[in-house]
Image: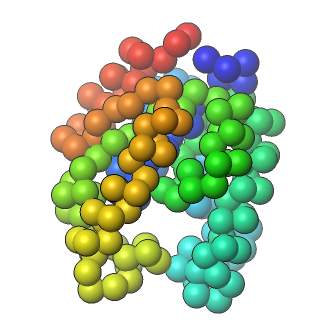
Amino acid sequence: MKKNQNIILIGMMGSGKTTIGQSLAFQKSYQFMDTDRLIIKKEKLSISEIFQSKSEQYFRNLETDICKSLSRYSRTVISTGGGIILRPENGTLLKQSGFIIFLDASAESILTRIKNDKNRPLLQKPNKKEIIHELVQQRHSLYSNLADLIVNTNQFNIKLIVDTIIKQLPI
């Protein structure tokens, strides 16, 4: 693991980054942080409200600002927003900040998990299934190429996924 021993979770919305991240942090006695929650706290707006009132570009700038600050953390599990990998700069910053795990889930699994979630700004349209399939197709190679470890979360057994991750961490 990198010198600061952070564990960074990347993947699509609904892949389990927050849930698995919290459990992993508990098991490792690490602190936990979620980049989306940090943005919500800082802006005092939901992500949907940021997208609507300020723009997606503004939100992506906030993500980059957070990526720049991650290297000051250590022994932290960091759950990232699904689109954080869209900027190559963010990928470089994440690589410098810790061990990156791609939580890989199929479009079908993601749709099942988030179909009723009203807090996903990219999915506030009637064709959620097509949008998710398109996003998975666009982002999968970005996640895969950045990851130090890829873990499938389709079955979503949290204990099994966390145990699998812990066994494969290079420490």
Q: Residue at x 72, y 65 (%)?
A: 61
Pinpoint residue 128: horizontal percent, then vertical percent: 28, 75
Q: Residue at x 64, y 48 (%)?
A: 88
Q: Residue at x 64, y 89 (%)?
A: 53
* Quadrant assignment for the C terminus: top right
In the figure, is residue 1 to the left or right of 4? left
Q: Residue at x 27, y 86 (%)?
A: 126
In the figure, is residue 129 to the left or right of 93? left
Q: Residue furthest top?
A: 171
Residue 9 appears in the figure:
yes
- Viewer-side residue, 23 vs 169: 169
In the figure, is residue 107 to the left or right of 35? left
In the figure, is residue 61 to the left or right of 50? right
- Viewer-side residue, 74 vs 105: 105
Which quarter of the picture shows residue 125? bottom left
* Quadrant assignment for the N terminus: top right
- Viewer-side residue, 79 vs 147: 147
Pinpoint residue 144: horizontal percent, then vertical percent: 43, 37
Pinpoint residue 32: horizontal percent, then vertical percent: 59, 41
Q: Is residue 149 above or below residue 105?
A: above
